[in-house]
C-alpha cells in the first residue's frame, strides 16, 4: 500500500515510519523542511520525501494526487 505520512519529522510520524516500512508499505513523507529529514538507509527504497507546509497554499501542489 502507498501511504502519505504527514508530519514525518514529528514525534509520532518519525516513530510510525519504520513500522510502516517494515510492513512493506511504500511511504511518501510530507515534511515542511526536506533538509531536516533523515531517511533511514534501511528503508531508503520504500521512502520518498516531499516538502509541503499546510499553512502555505503554494506548497500544497507538491502533494501527489491519487485516485
Image (cartoon, rainbow, N blue to C red):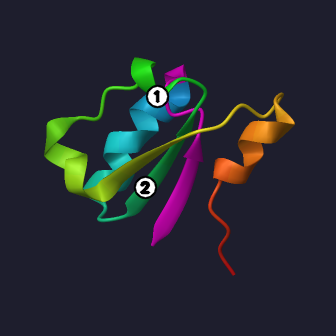
Q: Which residue is drawn at 78% across and 34% down?
A: 54
The span picked out in magenta is: 1-11
**Is 15 in front, or is 31?**
31
Q: Does the magenta stretch include residue 9?
A: yes
Residue 65 placement, left or right of 47 = right
* Residue topped by disc 1: 34
Residue 17 placement, left or right of 67 = left
Q: Is residue 3 above or below residue 10?
A: below
Extreme residue toward the left, this view = 42
Q: Which residue is drawn at 57% across and 54% down?
A: 4
Residue 39: x and y in percent read 29, 34
Please identify the quadrant where the C terminus is shown. bottom right
Q: Which mark lies nearer to you, 2 or 1?
A: 1
Q: In this view, does 63 lie above or below 57?
A: below
Crowdedness near tag 1: few (<14), some (14–19) or many (≥20) residues, C-alpha within 10 Å? some
**Is 52 in front, or is 14?**
52
Residue 5: x and y in percent read 55, 47
Q: How many labels does the image show?
A: 2
Secondary-structure class at tag 2: strand
Residue 42: x and y in percent read 14, 44
Where, by quadrant of the figure, is residue 16 drawn?
top left
Extreme residue toward the bottom, this view = 67
Q: Work out whether mark 2 precedes mark 1 in sequence or the reverse, and give the earlier one.
A: 2
Q: Do the residues labelled 2 and 1 touch (CB within 8 Å)?
A: no
Q: Is residue 5 magenta?
A: yes
Which circle marks residue 27 in the picture? 2
Q: Which residue is drawn at 31% across and 26% down?
A: 38
Cα–Cα span, label 2 and label 1: 15 Å
Residue 27: x and y in percent read 43, 55
Amino acid at each position: 500500500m502507498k501511504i502519505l505520512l504527514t508530519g514525518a519529522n514529528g514525534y509520532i510520524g518519525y516513530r510510525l515510519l519504520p513500522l510502516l516500512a517494515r510492513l512493506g508499505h511504500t511511504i511518501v513523507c510530507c515534511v515542511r523542511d526536506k533538509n531536516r529529514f533523515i531517511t533511514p538507509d534501511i528503508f531508503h527504497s520504500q521512502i520518498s520525501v516531499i516538502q509541503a507546509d499546510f499553512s502555505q497554499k503554494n506548497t500544497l501542489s507538491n502533494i501527489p494526487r491519487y485516485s
